[in-house]
Amino acid sequence: MNDKEEILQAIQASISANMKNIREDIQKSSEEVSAKLTDFNNQISALKSDYDALKKDVEDMKAKKLEDDKADNSENSQDDEEKPLSQAELNELAERNTTPSSPATVNTKENALGDALVDYALENKKYIMREDKNGRQ
């Protein structure tokens, strides 16, 4: 019986030692998992902060682009206002149009000036109303 009790005690001691080792391994693994989870949560927080900062930057860039577009549009609308041609510009346009584009086409100075005004209007996307001999537009 003595041998049986010793064997039983040895088995119980071995089981106790194994249980203690298992508990220690579980505790160690739990601490490692907890540390990794904390690190993961910190990384998620950092990524969220980066995302929020980028999102704000994009919104700021969109707002700036919108302001720039509005400023450009207001400048363009000011540029679109009809500017009277100087005499030098009229003469230059008339000279360009008096040069025949083909041998069959020859413009007089009067027609050349009218053509020059039409060219100017088309270049600036404006239509200039002219009166004919009877005062109609």
Image: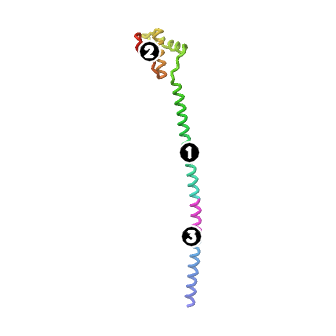
Q: Position of residue 135 (x, y in %)?
A: 41, 12
* Quarter of the N terminus within the rendering: bottom right
Local crowd at mark 1 within 10 Å, few (<14), some, or many (≥20)?
Answer: few
The answer to whether the residue labelled 2 contacts the one labelled 1, judged by CB atoms less than 8 Å apart, is: no
Q: Is residue 17 magenta?
A: no
- SS class, disc 1: helix
State which tag comes first along the sequence, 3 or 1.
3
* Quarter of the C terminus within the rendering: top left
- SS class, disc 3: helix
Residue 28 higher or lower than 65, as above or below: below
What are the residue bounds of the magenta stretch? Answer: 25-38
What residue sits right under mark 1 in the picture?
56
Q: Please state which amino acid type lies under the numbered disc 2.
A: Arg
Quarter of the image where one finds residue 106: top left
Q: Which residue corresponds to the image point at 47% horizontal and 9% vertical from the top-left?
A: 110
Q: CA distance from mark 2 to mark 1?
A: 54 Å
- SS class, disc 2: loop
Q: CA distance from mark 3 to mark 1?
A: 44 Å
Residue 130, labelled with which disc?
2
Q: Position of residue 121 (x, y in %)?
A: 47, 19
Secondary structure mostly taken by the magenta-highlighted segment of the chain: helix
Taking the view exactly as shown, the residue that stands out farthest to the front is 135
Which one is nearer the viewer's eye here, 40 or 128?
Answer: 128
Please state the total of marks drawn on the protein image: 3
State which tag comes first along the sequence, 2 or 1.
1
Q: Please state which amino acid type lies under the numbered disc 3.
A: Ile
Taking the view exactly as shown, the residue that stands out farthest to the top is 108
Q: CA distance from mark 2 to mark 3?
A: 97 Å
Residue 26, labelled with which disc?
3
